[in-house]
């Protein structure tokens, strides 16, 4: 297990697995509560951000590109959450 902790991608992978399990536990058999769905969407947005930063190497990208990606993640979370709460 310590082999995966040697680089940032390994740590990110473990975090992604943990967040996947957390979102499943949060969303499974809890109906369609609005706060739960927004929480699951927030976990998904954070996972997208983590994949982009660590596996697509946007962490070391030029500031405008990284900022655009960060805004993209927040905007999609806000849009999907707003649509879910509205509909």
Image (cartoon, grey):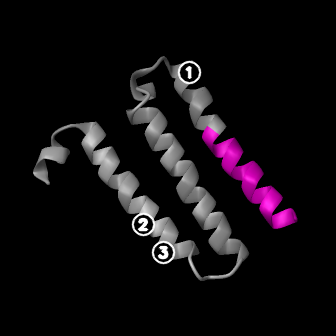
Q: Is residue 38 left or right of residue 57?
A: right
Q: Is residue 76 magenta-colored?
A: yes
Q: Residue furthest right?
A: 87
Rounded to the nearest angstrom, the CA distance separating label 3 from label 2 is 6 Å
- Please tell me whether mark 2 sits on a helix, a strand or a loop: helix
Residue 24: x and y in percent read 50, 69
> Which residues, given as a range, are shown in magenta?
73-87
Instruction: State the residue at coordinates (73%, 58%).
Output: 81
Instruction: Tell me which numbered mark, 1 or 2, is placed earlier along the sequence.
Output: 2
Rounded to the nearest angstrom, the CA distance separating label 1 from label 2 is 30 Å
Q: Which mark is nearer the camera, 3 or 1?
A: 3
Residue 8: x and y in percent read 27, 38
Instruction: State the residue at coordinates (61%, 41%).
Output: 73
Residue 34: x and y in percent read 72, 73
Disc 2 target residue = 21
**What number is the disc on residue 65?**
1
Disc 3 target residue = 25
Instruction: Tell me which numbered mark, 3 or 1, is placed earlier along the sequence.
Output: 3
Question: What secondary structure do most residues of the magenta stretch adopt?
Answer: helix
Q: Is residue 83 magenta-colored?
A: yes
Q: Residues within 10 Å of mark 1 (few under 14, many from 20)?
A: few
Instruction: State the residue at coordinates (56%, 54%).
Output: 44
């Amino acid at each position: 297990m310590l082999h995966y902790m040697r680089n940032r991608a390994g740590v990110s992978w473990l975090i992604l697995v943990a967040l996947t399990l957390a979102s499943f536990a949060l969303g499974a058999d809890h109906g369609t509560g609005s706060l739960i769905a927004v929480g699951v969407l927030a976990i998904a947005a954070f996972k997208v951000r983590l994949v982009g930063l660590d596996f697509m190497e946007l962490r070391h990208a030029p500031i405008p590109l990284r900022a655009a990606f960060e805004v993209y993640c927040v905007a999609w979370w806000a849009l999907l959450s707003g649509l879910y709460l509205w509909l």
